[in-house]
Amino acid sequence: MNRMSMLWVNRVVAPALVVGLTTGLAAAGVAQSVGGQAYGTYVNTPTGFSTRSPLAVLPAISGTDGAEADAQGSTLNIAGALSSEFLSSTTSGELGTLEAGAQSTASAASVNILNGLITADEVVANVMSSRTASTAVSNADGSTFTNLVVAGVPVTSGDAAVAPNTNISLPGVGYVVLNEQLPAGDGVTSSGLTVNMIHVYLQSLVGGVLDPLTGKVVGGSLQTTGEIIVGSATSNASM
Amino acid sequence: MLKNLMLRFTPSLAAAALVATACQDSTPLTSVAHKPNFWAGPPPACVTGKWTGGGRIDPPSNADLQDETSGGQPPRYSDGLSPMNGKVTFGFNVFLGSDDNGNCVVNKGEIQVNWHPGKVSWHVSIHDGVDAYDGRPVLASTFADNSGGFCVVVGIPETFMTARVNPQGGTELTQFEGCDNDRGEPQNSRSDAMRWRSMHFGDTGLTFLTGGNIVEHGS
């Protein structure tokens, strides 16, 4: 059962607060924007589906305003695909005269994917993006796995990071990308980053022909037929 | 001054509170309120403006001991609070203003804090100048720390602030502190810092962020 609560906050600032801002980024007369999103889990497989949850999305921000959104879930169980608990997603962002930025965090505990094929005591995805007068940067500092095990092989002992975009094959299933990082922006006027801590790609052979002599499939190609994501956080900032 | 105004938890009261917490399930966590002594001297300094941030700390690692008592904040684990160690994630957004008496108040704000080892989450929601969970104003202070950063404390004594606690479903008194140490220049050598104090679960101490960001935007 899913039990989630959602809080959305702080959407609008009086236009009067915007008037008179004459310094920094605002003085440049350019449009700033920030965005953020975080969710604990997503399942889309041939046998099960669960939307992005608990999902926190940064509301639209204008002027020089800020906002925070968060969502929590106690447990999630998609039979055969994924179970987890203590799910939490938080995102916040702001447009300021000196700095615009967003930061997002998603976490999930007691993670069990595909009947124990991948387990972790906890997963935390943490990203931030910042745009100042001189630069635009993003990073995923603080994104870690606690006691991650993939296909029976320990990947982390205790709480530790894994190199970005670590790809591990899952024979007969597909593959998993750990600490999947998807950057965006030019690093000067804009920067963004999505980190998916565990991204399982389920694959099947499509289009092959069964060789009657060998009993093996010949040709065809592996195609992604499903995916499971645990711990996803996105942030971006631009002007 | 402010130091003299700090709400003091006695060990015995803290112990009683812990026992009460352990024995209850969905009942409110708020225990007998610690009445403030008095409000002496001028109100704390306040630079009105907006603060936003989020990320992660991992106390007791990366403690910012040098700056912890800046602004009259008590040293960690004082007031009978126990250490709150381990992974803590958070996000917040607060708008500060001044009331008619010159006190620094939070006009609106949201604070979410998750203590992962204990699987406990807090949420503070402030609208129209009052705490959504107790109907009281939430006082704040801002100050420069010892290292060039700038900090905000939300829920200063004499009121602290009331947070909803999950999964217990109750409420308790809490306090948030965030320090913008990089001052608009992210990725420098000194990261921002955060502190969370909970009457029942303890004190993280002021701790540099493992990841994330805290930004003071001014007015």
Image (cartoon, coloured by chain):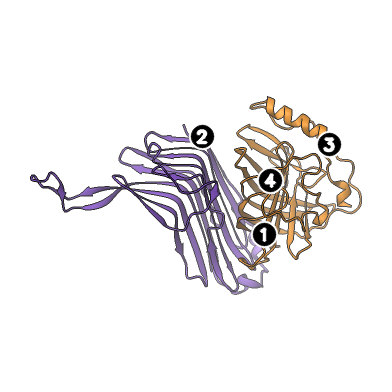
Residue type, numbered disc 3:
Thr
Which type of secondary structure does the marked residue at label 2 adopt?
loop
Mark 1 vs 3, N-terminal side:
3
The location of residue A166, given as percent across then percent down, is 42, 56
Which type of secondary structure does the marked residue at label 1 adopt?
loop
Q: Residue furthest left?
A: A213
Residue type, numbered disc 1:
Asp
Q: Please tell me how crowded label 2 is: few (under 14), some (14-19), or many (20+) other residues with Cα within 10 Å.
A: few
Q: Are marks 1 and 3 in contact (CB under 8 Å)?
A: no
- Write down the chain letter for disc 1: B
Q: Are marks 2 and 3 in contact (CB under 8 Å)?
A: no
Q: Which residue is mark 4?
A: B126
Mark 3 vs 4, N-terminal side:
3
Q: Which residue is mark 1?
A: B192
Q: Nearer the viewer, residue B90 or A21?
A: B90
Q: Nearer the viewer, mark 4 or mark 2?
A: 2
